[in-house]
Amino acid sequence: MDMDRRQWLALGAGLAGSGLARAQAGRRADNRSASGRSIGLALGGGSARGFAHIGVLQALDEAKIPVSVVAGTSAGSLVGAFYAAGFSPWKMQEVALKVRDIDVADLSSGNKRGMMGGAALKRLVNSLLDNQPIEKMQRRFAAVATDLASGEKLAIQRGDAGAAVVASCSIPGVFIPAMLEGRELVDGGLTSPVPVAVARQLGADFVIAVDVGGKPSAKPRSGLYEIILQSFEIMGRSLAQLEGKTANVLIQPRTDEFDSSDFSARKEMIEAGYAAGQAALPELRRKLGLS
């Protein structure tokens, strides 16, 4: 697509919907690398820092790295759903320039269980994806969420894509817990902030993990929303680092200077992601046996 990669996408968080199921072997053809390996992406959470995922995907697409599996947590599930459905990173950034806060954050739907519901985000995702269910996507995809009652990690691999994204990104206190088949689901970052194991369960034998989290911001917290996001990031940092080490290649965009609640720094975060993706290409090519 004839677009400047500095243009941007506006992505959000995550809700619930339909179909908790294990990946179906052979559901769609693998895009294997020249070495015969099935390459998967594990896109981690990070709220606004999730914009960096788009830059990483741009670098991978330019290098023609063949990805057949995508697992996403929280913001990573939103980016991952579009990528799995066939959107190029360039198309994603085109969409981002048009999306408004009100398109993803319906504060009027909040109650004592959360600041907002996920209906607006669900509608946005499904409208852009033409209501394409997860099992019909071009790449195998799973959105990772957490069962609020049991603490169980769930990989949503079938059904309503918008609902799955909302569930994956339902940060406790920010989003009202999402309902799916009688279960209350919250953000997947509680149990798998960088879902490497889920990518392997989907069939990947080579996993590229993208960890967009960073050090907590030293800026004063101006409100409840900012406090919740900062606390959530602090809580999941150690687990994210452990999960990232299990990947074949770990890409970590330099997002420390950006606040996880600052959705105005989209361009800068995409650039950070692109730079990190470019820097990782020599290692990727070497490990995959690509020239």
Image: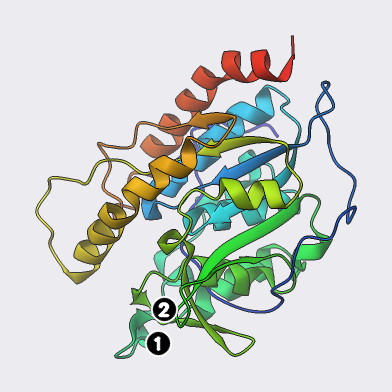
The picture places residue 74, in percent across and down from the top left corner, at 48, 59
- CB of mark 1 within 8 Å of CB of mark 2? yes
Q: Which residue is mark 2?
A: 106
Q: Secondary structure at mark 2?
A: loop
Q: Which residue is mark 1?
A: 109
Q: Residues within 10 Å of mark 1 (few under 14, many from 20)?
A: some
Residue 212 visible in the snapshot: no
Q: Nearer the viewer, residue 111 or 285?
A: 285
Identified by mark 2, the residue type is Asp
Q: Which mark is residue 30?
A: none
Q: Nearer the viewer, residue 175 or 148?
A: 148
Is 108 displayed left or right of 209 in the figure? left
The picture places residue 142, in percent across and down from the top left corner, at 66, 59
Instruction: Name the residue rendered at 73%, 37% in the picture.
Output: 205
Q: Residues within 10 Å of mark 2 (few under 14, many from 20)?
A: some
- For the residues marked 1 and 2, what is the alpha-carbon distance in whole angstroms? 6 Å
